[in-house]
Amino acid sequence: MSCTIKKRQSVLRNLFCFAVVSLIIMLTVGCERKAEAKQTLVVATEATFPPYEFYRGNEIVGIDMDILREIARRNNLHFQIEDMSFDSLITAVQTGKVDLVASGLTVSPDRARQVAFTRSYANARQVVIVPENSPITGREDLRHYRLGVQHGSTGDMYVSEHIGEAERFTNGALAVAAMNAGKLDAVVLDNAPAENHVAGNKGLKILPEPLVEEEYAMAVSKSRPELLEMLNKSLAELEADGTLARITEAYMKDNKPENTAEAHGAWARLKENFHTNFIKNDRWTYLVKGFCVTIEISAAAAVMGILLGFLIGVIRSTADQTGKLRFLNALCRLYLTVVRGTPVVVQLLIIYFVIFGSVDISKVLVAIVAFGLNSAAYVAEIVRSGIMSVDPGQMEAGRSLGLGYGTTMRNVILPQAFKNVLPALGNEFIVLLKETSICGYIALQDLTKGGDIIRSQTYDAFLPLLAVALVYLSLVVLLSHLLKKLEIRLKKNER
Ligand code: GLN
């Protein structure tokens, strides 16, 4: 019996040391990344808005990005781009997460109440994209059909105010893809990306009559008048010396996206689609890059979840069994109630925008903390149930041998509890791994976001989603296999 316990203890000790060391390494890597990025102008954008911002390879390019590059060059600054969901852009600038928004952003009175706009640098229109054979001819017909818009855009606001209900997508490209799949009858979007999408998709057209005229400007926090002044001055110079017009023209004529399958026959089409989605422009690299981010966040969060979860689980069960640690137990219960009572995406956003709102911290680190804290709550309950499942006689036996409560817990109860809860813990890791797919909300390019970028470029939902699903599935299968091995090893040690 003592030999078994020793073996189990040594497995646990090794796991524990490995966990602590990996957590420290991962957190350090996360911190260092941010340190490199200091002293730069951080710009938020939503990079599926060609020709203003879009991915070319792994780089974000477009009219807005070239304007920024020019402004940065003339003012001797660096700039760093954060690609995030469109509806997070204004919050990001308000909370100080970024210095400015450059994202084909329309000036509107509602937005002007929250952020300061620079002078305008482009004119735009909200237009309607429909299939070529659509019965829709103008604004009046729209209310009878299924409309798609980009969530939080001025197109979204216009439709809600003047037309009626619409389906909201995270970006215009996904709405167009939904229309291609027959799920929508029309998409309301800004004219420049609309022209781009129509050029990239067979059988679509733009209705001649625009819904509303708009102007684009950059946005900064109202508390940064010096930045606003610098941007206004630079934009005025770029306009006066013709640079603005030159950049805009170059993109307007240069940027025609490629279409997906032209080939005939299912097999030939699949081959061509595969080429377009993964090989062309090295798009597979979005998935590889995303895969690394997903692994880094999941692994570090799992380690953090285990360490913290074990601690909370032990506190809770000690309180249950001995009536001690009342205050700590109450704190832990509060923590569990809050974490388990709110969605993880809300926690992630609160941690990013509110708790670390004004702290200059790497997003990878924010995600690790958010998922780690979340996972700890579930691990804690798993551990508690594991401890409770160990026969109370074990504790009594340990105590009657003269061992203290802590020693008995550490050397007798916890090793047995760990073995009992391993399947449930494994399940928690699997959930955690898949949960990290919401990282895109804070502009992290994880595996899911990598697939989203491909979808927004190729308008093909099937292959990118299938690829992403297959990668997650393989990871889960591998993880389950490793856990099974660990379980078998622990069982062998028992004999
Ligand atoms: N111009 C629109 C808006 O500001 C859409 C911009 C975008 O999608 N990047 O709401």
Image (cartoon, helix red, strand yellow):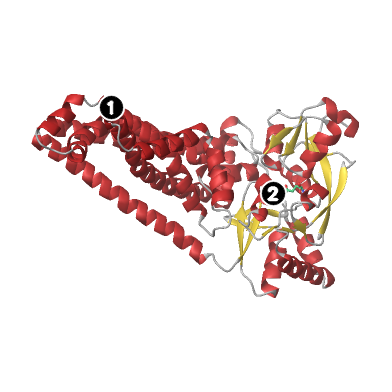
Image vertical order of residue 345 relative to residue 112, above or below: above
Quarter placement of the C terminus: top left
Q: Nearer the viewer, mark 2 or mark 1?
A: 1
Q: In the drawing, does residue 4 fall left or right of residue 480?
A: left
**Residue 57 rendering spot, x and y as whole percentages:** 58, 55
Q: Mark 1 is on which residue type?
A: Met
The crowding category of the residue bearing disc 1, from other C-alpha atoms within 10 Å (few below 14, some 14 to 19, many at least 20), is some
Observer-nearest of 227 and 236 = 227
Q: Mark 2 is on which residue type?
A: Pro
Observer-nearest of 263 and 21 = 21
Residue shown at 61% from the left, 52% from the top: 83
**Residue 461 rendering spot, x and y as whole percentages:** 61, 36
**Residue 178 rendering spot, x and y as whole percentages:** 68, 33
Residue at the disc numbered 1: 388
Image vertical order of residue 123 relative to residue 477, above or below: below
Query: What label does residue 257 carry, if any?
Result: 2
The crowding category of the residue bearing disc 2, from other C-alpha atoms within 10 Å (few below 14, some 14 to 19, many at least 20), is some
Residue shown at 54% from the left, 60% from the top: 360
Can residue 139 be seen from the camera position used here? yes
Quarter-of-image position of residue 182: top right
Q: Please tell me whether mark 1 sits on a helix, a strand or a loop.
A: helix
Observer-nearest of 27 and 166 = 27
Q: CA distance from mark 2 to mark 1?
A: 60 Å
Observer-nearest of 484 and 128 = 484
**Residue 217 rendering spot, x and y as whole percentages:** 78, 57
Q: Please tell me whether mark 2 sits on a helix, a strand or a loop.
A: loop
Quarter-of-image position of residue 299: top left
